[in-house]
Amino acid sequence: MAALPADLPSFRGRLVPRDPARVKAMVLHLRHELHGASKGDRGRVVRSTVPDADPATVAAACTACGGHCCRKGGNDGFLDTHDLVRIAAALRLNRQKLEAAYAAAVADATHKDSCIFHGARGCTLSREMRSRVCNAYYCGPLERLLKGAAQSSPGAGKPASVRAPARRA
């Protein structure tokens, strides 16, 4: 299969030390969302636009980009009630242990003005602890790359080459 180039967005934020105020805000968000779970709130529906995307291609693209879409994750990491109920059940964690797991996942250095879980090497959360948004969202260039790979004949689904734009000074 010929390599499928993709011009990806790029994020090259500045790392700053772990901020206890951000961690506290994240824990308060989790508590608020978990309180919603007791009221039956199940959050929004999120579906991937490319459900059978090759994980290696996605990982390569997101690594090359550096986390452009992560910038909007703020102190909540896109986590909502539905995510937290699903994750707590899958990992068999009670509320206190879930909060502790998320607090522990915040790196010692995170990107300024990005998701609280956006560390020096990308997302500090395992796939199973990430929100549905994080696991399902593909930026426009990556979505086009993945859909092109899925439509190509032999070798569809194999990793494609990706490139992030040159860093501007």
Image (cartoon, grey):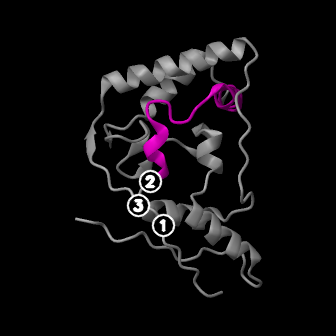
* Residue designated by label 1: 8
Q: CA distance from mark 1 to mark 2?
A: 9 Å
Q: Which residues are magenta?
A: 67-90
**Identity of the amino acid at label 2?**
His
Answer left or right for 88 relative to 153. left
Viewer-proximal residue, 92 or 109? 109
User: Dot 3: what SS?
Assistant: loop
* Residue designated by label 2: 68
Residue in the picture at 45% in, 62% down: 9
Crowding at dot 2, Cα within 10 Å, few <14 / some 14-19 / many 20+, comes out as: some
Could you say where residue 168 lies in the image, as x and y percent from the top left? 27, 66
CB-based contact (under 8 Å), mark 3 and mark 2 = yes
Answer left or right for 134 relative to 70. right
Q: Which mark is residue 132?
A: none
Q: Which mark is residue 10?
A: 3
Q: Earlier in the sequence, mark 3 or mark 2?
A: 3
**Identity of the amino acid at label 3?**
Ser
CB-based contact (under 8 Å), mark 1 and mark 2 = yes
